[in-house]
Amino acid sequence: MLVRNIVAAIEGMVVNASLDGALDKEVLGLTNHSAQVKPGYVFICRKGSKFDSHELVPEVAKRDPALIVMEKVVPCKVPHVIVPDSRLAEALIAAEFYNHPYKKLLTIGVTGTNGKTTCVHLFHHVLKQLGLKGSMLGTVVYDILGEKPFHADNTTPDAIVTLSAMAKTVQRNGQYFAMEVSSHALAMKRVESIRFDIAGLTNITRDHLDYHQNFEDYVKTKLHIFDLLKDEGIAVISDEYQHLLSKKVRKVVYGISTKSDYKILDMDVEKHKTKFRFSTKFGIFDCEINQPGVHFAYNASLVMAALMEIGYDPKAVVEAVKTFPGVEGRFQYVPEASLLGIEVVVDFAHSPDALEKTLITARKLSSGRVITVFGAGGQADKGKRPLMAEVVCKYSDITIITTDDPRGEDPEEILRQVEKGVIPGCPYLLIPDRAEAIETALTIANRGDMVIVAGRGHEEYQIFSEEKKIPFKDADVIRELIKKVAGKGKDVA
Ligand SMILES: CC(=O)N[C@H]1[C@@H](OP(=O)(O)OP(=O)(O)OC[C@H]2O[C@@H](n3ccc(=O)[nH]c3=O)[C@H](O)[C@@H]2O)O[C@H](CO)[C@@H](O)[C@@H]1O[C@H](C)C(=O)N[C@@H](C)C(=O)N[C@H](CCC(=O)O)C(=O)O
Ligand SMILES: Nc1ncnc2c1ncn2[C@@H]1O[C@H](COP(=O)(O)OP(=O)(O)OP(=O)(O)O)[C@@H](O)[C@H]1O
C-alpha cells in the first residue's frame, strides 16, 4: 500500500499537508506508539489522558516514517498531514491498510453496561459449535484465530489492533469476528470504520459517568453502535431498551414482553442453569444456559435471536447454547465451599444493576442468608459507589464492604464513599483488607448460607496503583481461606 492510498482514506479531513515526493512511498506498517515506529511506518499522534505524542514528533521523524498524522502543527521535515481528529483518522487509515476485512467476515459487536463478555463468548462458542472458524475480542480474552488466546488491558482495542486481528482472521480463512464494544471505544472512535452484521445492545444502566458527561451522553454513545451497521445488518436489542432506538434499522427485539420478536417464556432459575422457552417465528424452543439468573437468559436470548434472524438453524443454535460452559468469574461457584456447608460464588458485578441481578439470583437460590463482600474500583465512576452499597444492603442479610482495585485512590476513602449508601439499620461491616473480608464472611456463614464475592470476577491482580499490583484472584484466595476456616474446626452443623 502506498502513502497516496492512506491519504485518500482520510481525504475529506486533511486540513494541511506536506507530502513532497512521499505519495508513492510504500507503507510498511501503522502505529500510534512512538516506540514501534520503523522506516516506512505511518505514525498517528494522539493526545491521551497521560501523554501527548505530538511531543515525540521530532524524535520519531529521525526514524524515516512514511507519514506522520497530527492534530496540531509540529514543525518537521518528514511527510505529514494535519487532521482535526487523529483517532478518527486512525480508524479510517487502519480500515484502508488492512483492506476493509470486516466486509469478508460475519461481524458481531455487542455493547451494553453489563453482559457484553457473556454474549460475545456465547457467540464465539455457538458459531464454533456450528462448524465456523473465527475470532473474539473482549475483557477476559482476545482469541484471534490461529493464535494463542491472551488477555489484554482493553475490552475493545484501538482500531489498528482490531482491524489487524480482523485481517488475520480473513487470511486464516475465518468466517466471523465477535467483539465487545465498550462505550469508551465508541467515544474514542476505535470501531468507527468497522461495519457490523450484528450489533447487540444488552442494557444501559448506571456506570462510567466519570468518563461520560452524563447519563444521556452515555446512552447516546452506546446507541452509536447502530450507526455502524452494514446495509443488511441487524440491531438486536432487549425489550426494555428498544424504545431508545429510533433510527431506521432492521430491529430485532428480544425479552419477556409482548413487544419482543423473540420472547422468553416460563423462566426457571436453577442452581447451575436457567431454563426457559423461547418463542420465535420459527417455533417455540426449550432452551437452557448453564448460568443461573434472569440476566443470563437475556444474554442467551440476544445471541439466539441474532443468529436465528440471520439464518442459522434455530434448533442447532439452541442446542449449541446448552453446551456453553459459561465465563470465568460470572456466577462462578467455588465447589470447595461444601467443606463448610455453604455456597460461595464469585461474580464480576461492579455496577448497581449487575449487583442487583446477581443478588436477586442469590436470594432465589440460597436456602439460608445472603452475605455479600464487595467494594468499588478506583479511577472510575464515583457516583455509583453509594448506589452499589444501597443495592447490596437491599438484597443481603449481611453486607461486607471491602477494597476492590483502588488504582491510585485512597482505599479507605473509597470505602467511606461506598458506606454512604448503606441503608440505615442494615447489618454491615467495613473490612478494608479483601482477604480478611472474605475470611470474615466464610467464618460467619452458617450451613445453607450463600456468600457472594463481587466485583473482580476473573481478575488476577488487585491494582492498588500503577506500581503496586498484587496477585489476587478471588476464586483462588477463597479456596485457600475455605481450607483455613475449615482447619480451625468451624462447626458447620
Ligand atoms: C483513558 C484511556 O482510555 N486510555 C487508553 C488510551 O491511552 P491514552 O491515549 O490515554 O494513552 P497515553 O498514555 O496518554 O498516550 C497518548 C498517546 O501517546 C502515545 N505514546 C505514549 C507514550 C510514548 O512513549 N509514546 C507514545 O507514542 C500512546 O500510544 C497514545 O497514542 O489508549 C491506550 C491504547 O489504545 C489504551 O490502552 C488506554 O486504555 C486504558 C488502559 C484504559 O484504562 N482505558 C479504559 C478507560 C477503557 O478504555 N476501558 C474500556 C472498557 C470499560 C468497561 O467496559 O469496563 C475498554 O474498552 O477497555
Ligand atoms: N444482561 C445482564 N444484565 C445485568 N447484569 C448482567 C447481565 N449479564 C451479566 N451481568 C452482570 O454483569 C457482570 C459482568 O458481566 P459481563 O462480564 O458479561 O459484562 P460486561 O458488559 O462485559 O462487563 P464489563 O464491561 O465490566 O467487562 C456479571 O458478572 C453479572 O453480575
Image (tube, rainbow, N blue to C red):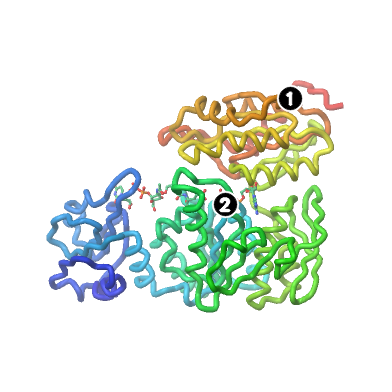
Is residue 488 among what the camera can see? yes
| Res 289 → quadrant | bottom right
Looking at mark 2, is its residue's CB closer than 8 Å to ligand 2? Answer: yes
How many neighbours does mark 2 have within 10 angstroms: few (below 14), some (14-19), or many (20 or more)?
Answer: many
Is residue 146 among what the camera can see? no
Image location (x, y in percent) of residue 169: 49, 69
Residue that label 2 marks: 113
Alpha-carbon span between mark 2 and mark 1: 33 Å
| Res 15 → quadrant | bottom left
Q: In which quarter of the image is the N terminus?
A: bottom left
- Relative to 230, residue 430 above or below: above
Q: Residue at x 58, y 72 (%)?
A: 234
Residue that label 1 marks: 443
Q: Which residue is drawn at 63% across and 25% down?
A: 436
Q: Nearer the viewer, residue 161 or 383?
A: 383
Image location (x, y in percent) of residue 62: 16, 56
How many neighbours does mark 1 have within 10 angstroms: few (below 14), some (14-19), or many (20 or more)?
Answer: some
Quick check: 116 left or right of 184?
Answer: right
Image location (x, y in percent) of residue 337: 76, 35
Q: Which residue is drawn at 29% across and 70% down?
A: 10
Q: Which amino acid does label 1 sit on?
A: Thr
Q: Which amino acid does label 2 sit on?
A: Thr
Q: Quadrant of the C terminus?
A: top right
SS under mark 1: helix
Quick check: 292 left or right of 20?
Answer: right
Q: Which residue is drawn at 57% across and 31% down?
A: 418
> Which numbered disc, 2 or 1, marks the residue that appears first in the sequence?
2
SS under mark 2: loop
- Relative to 367, residue 435 above or below: above
Mark 2 vs mark 1, foreground winner is: 2
